[in-house]
Image (spheres, grey):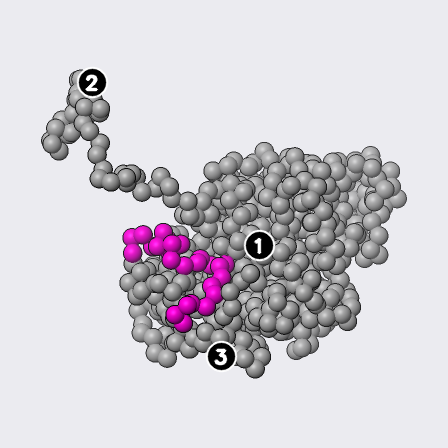
């Protein structure tokens, strides 16, 4: 029979009549279909993108040299070569799958309006003063006028009819024109830039829908309020009025001076309560754990037993000169917030910080770059150059002394948002974010997947139907488990695959946090799979090694593993203790961007700058509760 089919196929290809398909019966026993994918509906693709990119339409980009708008930003993200504002051609190694242009809501689009000499802007005293500075080739003077005026908290352009509407509609139009369902997703968004007492409490607001509904409002800005509770109320009014959906993503809190995860409501001594917890949990399902301004997963002071906690750490101050004190640190980092969220849930009934984790760039160049060897800086003045400014410019703790200063060499190339979804559309990607089925990477595109449940076994990570088995018998990253009727500990299935254009993997870890009956919060790091080494007492025996050549800024994949997969059970599981578990995956060491710069421009780097970096991924947690949910 096989020869008959082959002959028929060859005759068809040659134009000779052959047996018709209906002459050969298609019979599958029972009620099964031949294709196993006809009814498959679980997320089967991972998409990489950036939810935090600024263009010239943000004042702190356009007024300090960025000339590229949303159109160029989207074209670059889709893989086109774009000339940076400093005249350097730039291109991604491979395109992104999605992008959010998240320009600052405050004085939205003021830079392009100045360039265009918009008559509405030019008719105001504020606009005239900025135009005068631009005509005098004094961008620093223009920036000083803008920042001083903004600091008053009063919008000098609030009464100019139609000004912000025209800019917002241009931004939404750019997103609409670049959105290609199934190929590339251009999500509409903006950044609410709360700088309460100059502390960074910024949020990116992401729309599920399109231009038609987004154009019915203007972005909520700090001029409206610096309080996140007012932002959440605004989001609720928008949803009620339009039927569209919104979510907000807070920045990593290491420039918030203890305000990002504070125990009191902003600007008051009132403790956060159940209403606050419910609103924050609803409107902020994600947290941007890594970006240009350092990494916000963990801090060595909070996690002294974690050898990888001191990674791209920014812990000196905030945006302004106010120094950081040790009591602020616990209220700034993701792992500590996840632990404290367990305690708040026990106290209030709601966990305000039950968030998934993503990364993004916070780049102000319109260029969403995240790889160490393609680091275009995060502001235009710091784009690739041999000028010392590339390393020496003060970018954090501005106005303070050296004890609070963060320098340009300390900025991170990070990061990316990875989303597990069924298709590359606005709706599918937004929905995955809302259910927290996402993870963060510090720049590479490794693929990471985790499931937890009570019916998994040791061999399951190697199953051919790994994903379908995981969904059928457990929950994915971002999910929740309650106590098993038989009192069994949950089992975890983890797979990690290296970036196809990047470095091998060093290890896979599970980070656990839990709350004891006496109210103590604890954490533990478990190495659960190690490339080429054994595990003893939950730790890899030995380091993976380091192949980085400092002089040439190169490395090899002669160490590590391209793929790690394992099954793990918590050896210390206590069914009475609320807990969370998330996966951290580390790559082998590769050259940091500063090392790449030293090789390209033949210059020295600061002696305290690391030569290599171990890029990593953080998955959204899976939470365990000893009591069923309502």
Q: How far apart are marks 3 and 1 (CA)?
A: 29 Å
| Residue 76: quadrant of the picture | top right
Question: In the image, 226: left or right of 89?
Answer: right
Under circle 3, the secondary element is loop
Q: Residues within 10 Å of mark 2 (few under 14, many from 20)?
A: few
At 83% from the left edge and 37% from the top edge, which residue is drawn? 161
Between circles 3 and 1, the one closer to the viewer is 3
**Range of the magenta residues?**
463-487
- Pick whichever of labels 1 and 2 is earlier in the sequence: 2
Q: How far apart are marks 2 and 3 (CA)?
A: 72 Å
Q: Name the residue under label 3.
A: 305
Q: Where is residue 481 in the image (x, y as percent from the top left)?
A: 47, 63
Q: Residue 452 carries which label?
A: none
- Whether residue 629 is in magenta: the answer is no
Residue 244 or residue 191, whichever sits in front: 244
- Pick whichever of labels 2 and 3 is earlier in the sequence: 2
- Pick whichever of labels 3 and 1 is earlier in the sequence: 3
Q: Name the residue under label 2.
A: 15
| Residue 445: quadrant of the picture | bottom left
Q: Where is residue 623 in the image (x, y as percent from the top left)?
A: 50, 65
User: Is the N terminus in the top left, top right, bottom left or bottom right quadrant?
Assistant: top left
At 54% from the left edge and 52% from the top edge, which residue is drawn? 433
Q: Distance between the residues labelled 1 and 2?
A: 56 Å
Q: Most extreme residue toward the right, as rendered?
A: 125
Q: Where is residue 413 in the image (x, y as percent from the top left)?
A: 54, 58
- Whether residue 486 is in magenta: the answer is yes
Q: Which mark is residue 361?
A: 1
């Amino acid at each position: 029979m096989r020869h008959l089919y082959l002959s028929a196929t060859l005759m068809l290809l040659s134009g000779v009549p052959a047996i018709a398909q209906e002459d050969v019966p298609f019979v599958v026993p029972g009620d099964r279909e031949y294709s196993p994918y006809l009814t498959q509906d679980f997320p089967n693709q991972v998409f990489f993108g950036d939810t935090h990119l600024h263009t010239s339409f943000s004042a702190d980009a356009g007024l300090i040299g960025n000339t590229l708008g949303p159109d160029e930003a989207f074209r670059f993200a889709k893989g086109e070569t774009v000339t940076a504002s400093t005249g350097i051609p730039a291109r991604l190694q491979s395109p992104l799958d999605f992008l959010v242009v998240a320009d600052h809501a405050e004085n939205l689009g003021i830079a392009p309006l100045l360039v265009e000499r918009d008559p509405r802007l030019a008719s105001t005293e504020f606009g005239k003063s900025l135009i005068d500075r631009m005509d005098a080739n004094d961008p620093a003077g223009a920036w000083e006028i803008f920042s001083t005026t903004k600091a008053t908290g009063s919008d000098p352009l609030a009464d100019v009819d139609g000004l912000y509407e025209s800019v917002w509609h241009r931004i939404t139009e750019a997103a609409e024109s670049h959105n290609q369902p199934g190929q590339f997703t251009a999500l509409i968004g903006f950044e609410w830039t709360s700088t309460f007492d100059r502390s960074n409490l910024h949020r990116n607001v992401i729309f599920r829908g399109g231009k038609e509904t987004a154009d019915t409002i203007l972005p909520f800005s700090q001029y409206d309020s610096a309080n996140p509770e007012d932002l959440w109320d605004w989001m609720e009014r928008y949803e009620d009025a339009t039927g569209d959906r919104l979510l907000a993503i807070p920045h990593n809190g290491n420039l918030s001076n203890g305000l990002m995860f504070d125990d009191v409501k902003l600007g008051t001594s009132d403790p956060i309560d159940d209403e606050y917890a419910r609103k924050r949990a609803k409107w902020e399902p994600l947290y941007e754990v890594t970006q240009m301004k350092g990494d916000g997963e963990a801090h060595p002071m909070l996690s002294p037993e974690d050898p990888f906690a001191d990674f791209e750490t920014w812990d000196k101050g905030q945006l302004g000169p106010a120094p950081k004190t040790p009591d602020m640190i616990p209220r700034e980092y993701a792992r500590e917030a996840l632990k404290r969220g367990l305690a708040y849930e026990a106290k209030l009934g709601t966990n305000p910080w039950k968030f998934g984790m993503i990364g993004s760039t916070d780049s102000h160049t319109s260029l969403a770059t995240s790889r160490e060897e393609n680091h275009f800086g995060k502001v235009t003045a710091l784009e690739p150059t041999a000028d010392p400014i590339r390393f020496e410019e003060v970018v954090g703790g501005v106005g303070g002394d050296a004890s609070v200063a963060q320098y340009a060499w300390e900025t991170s190339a990070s990061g990316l948002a990875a989303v597990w979804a069924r298709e590359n559309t606005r709706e599918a990607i937004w929905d995955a974010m809302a259910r927290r089925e996402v993870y963060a990477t510090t720049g590479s595109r490794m693929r990471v997947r985790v499931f937890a449940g009570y019916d998994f076994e040791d061999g399951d990570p190697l199953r051919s139907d790994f994903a379908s088995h995981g969904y059928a018998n457990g929950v994915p990253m971002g999910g929740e488990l309650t106590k098993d009727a038989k009192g069994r500990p949950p089992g975890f299935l983890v797979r990690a695959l290296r970036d196809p254009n990047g470095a091998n993997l060093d290890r896979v870890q599970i980070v656990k946090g839990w709350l004891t009956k006496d109210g103590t919060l604890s954490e533990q790091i478990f190495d659960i799979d190690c490339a080429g080494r054994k595990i003893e007492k939950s730790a890899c025996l030995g380091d993976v090694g380091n192949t980085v050549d400092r002089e040439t800024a190169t490395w090899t994949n002669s160490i590590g593993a391209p793929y790690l997969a394992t099954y793990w059970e918590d050896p210390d599981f206590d069914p009475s203790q609320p807990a969370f578990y998330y996966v951290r995956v580390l790559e082998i060491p590769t050259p940091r961007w500063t090392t790449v710069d030293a090789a390209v421009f033949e210059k020295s780097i600061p002696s305290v700058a690391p030569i290599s970096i171990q890029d990593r991924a953080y998955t959204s947690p899976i939470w365990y509760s000893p009591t069923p949910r309502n």
